[in-house]
Structures are given as C-alpha cells and as structure tokens.
Image (cartoon, rainbow, N blue to C red):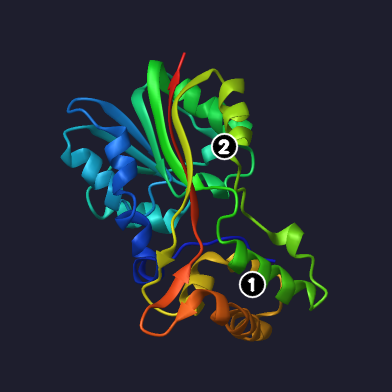
Amino acid sequence: MEGQRWNPEEYARNARFVSDLGEPVLDLLAPVAGERVLDLGCGDGVLTRKIREAGCAVVAVDSSLEQVAAARAQGLDARVENAESLPFDGEFEAVFSNAVLHWVKDHDAMLEGVSRALVPSGRFVAELGGAGCVQEIRSALHASLNGRGVDAVALDPWFFPTPSEYEVLLSRHGFTVDSLELFPRPTPLPGDVSGWLETFAKPFLGGVPEHERRNVIDEVRESLRPKLYATGQGWVADYVRLRFRVRRA
C-alpha cells in the first residue's frame, strides 16, 4: 500500500491549476510588507513566492521532500515539516494554506500547531476541499476498488468538511471566524482525467498491484466520461471549496 507522493514535474504538468486558482486565497490573506507569514503546505512554492514578492518574510513548509526541494530551488526558505507537528511558537502574523488541509488526518493537532505558531490576533487564511468535493471522482474510485475486493474507505485520504463541521474545529482551538464559505468550483483540467488520477489518487492506486493500476485508471475514466467530459470543453473536475479567514484569540 502506498500513500500520496508528490513529483514536482508531474504536479506542474497535471496540477498547475491548483496554484493558479489560489489567487483569491492570496487576496483574502492580504499580505502586508514586513509581516512574517507561514505557508503551510507550500508545494513547489509558486504562491510562497508571491507572498514574498509582497514584502513578507515567509517560511514555507511541506511534508514532501521533493516539493520542498523544488521550492528551495526558487530561493525560498522551505522546510520539511508535518502539518500535525508544527514546531513554531508565536513566530508569525499570518498562516496561509491552499489546497492542503483536506490531506491532513489530525485536524486538532494541525490547528493546535497553527494557533501556537501565530502571535495573538494573528490570522489563518486557507482554502481546502469542502463537502462534496470531487464526489464523482471519489465515487468512481470507490466503486472500482470495491469491485476488486479492496476496502476503498480504508485507503481514502481526503477530509472534505462542511462549514459547520469546520467551524466547530476552529472554535475548539480558539479561532474567531471572520469568513467561512463553501462554494462549487468546477475546474477544467489541463489534460485527460487520467493525469489527475495519476497525480492525486495515489493512495487509492496503491491499494492494487502495480500491474492493475492502469486498468483502474481506465475504468474510472470511462465511468466519469459521461459526467465530467464534454466535447469542445474537455474534462472538468467537480471541485467544491471551503475558504476561510479566522483569527487567533
């Protein structure tokens, strides 16, 4: 069984839309020159660089050694850290995160670390997958694996909360909510949905023998074609996002 691993070249090819569509989250962050900002789950550092260009002192963290290496290659202060065990204490005016938190298993541990990393009244601005995100893709993956006798629920890495679920978590860790919004964001893919599956569905694919993975991808692709593909438009993933801005006490 394999977990999610990130290949920067594959990510740039199949998932550049993730950072491209992160601009509204940056706008919500509203970085101010001179601020200290933590980028939680920086990936290859494309958005980190934009925060730095706004005049902030940015520390970028990610659990992927490969992605951190790609961020460091851009001259960023990027470090390998786990979101559930952040080592910082009162060091940042803001924490920023885009398209990462739905991969985190222990949100209590993560939010405790974010709260500790912030100065009093520091803000936490993030976007993650929300309730219903990639529901068609997720259901097709579950059906394909379950049909092979594999427990898809045990392999499923994603947490897509409702606003009320996440507000409870945030409140538990002393955050005051400024804004919290769930919205659909159908997302055109840069190529075939197979590339999306190869990039984002590794935990599912790791549940079957390597020689069977291409069959799973092809089966899921054909299941999704009537729902997510249109001639002249291409593949559009059924994304739903949860975006928030909160403040530490």
The three-letter amino acid code for the residue at tag 2 is: Pro
- Residue 205 is tagged as 1
In the rendered image, residue 212, in percent from the top left (x then y), is placed at: 68, 84
Query: Which quadrant holds residue 58?
Result: top left
- Residue under the image location 71 percent in, 68 percent down: 142
- Residue under the image location 70 percent in, 66 percent down: 1
Residue 122 appears left or right of 168: left
Residue 212 appears left or right of 63: right
Residue 206 appears left or right of 73: right
Query: Taking the image as drawn, is residue 48 in sight?
Result: yes
Q: Closer to the camera, 61 or 185?
A: 185
In the image, residue 220 sits, relative to residue 20, either above or below, namely below
In the rendered image, residue 230, in percent from the top left (x then y), is placed at: 44, 81
The three-letter amino acid code for the residue at tag 1 is: Leu
Dot 2 falls on a residue whose secondary structure is helix
- Residue under the image location 43 percent in, 56 percent down: 185
Crowding at mark 2 (Cα within 10 Å: few <14, some 14-19, many 20+): some
Query: Taking the image as drawn, is residue 206 in sight?
Result: no
Crowding at mark 1 (Cα within 10 Å: few <14, some 14-19, many 20+): many
In the image, residue 157 sits, relative to residue 213, either above or below, namely above
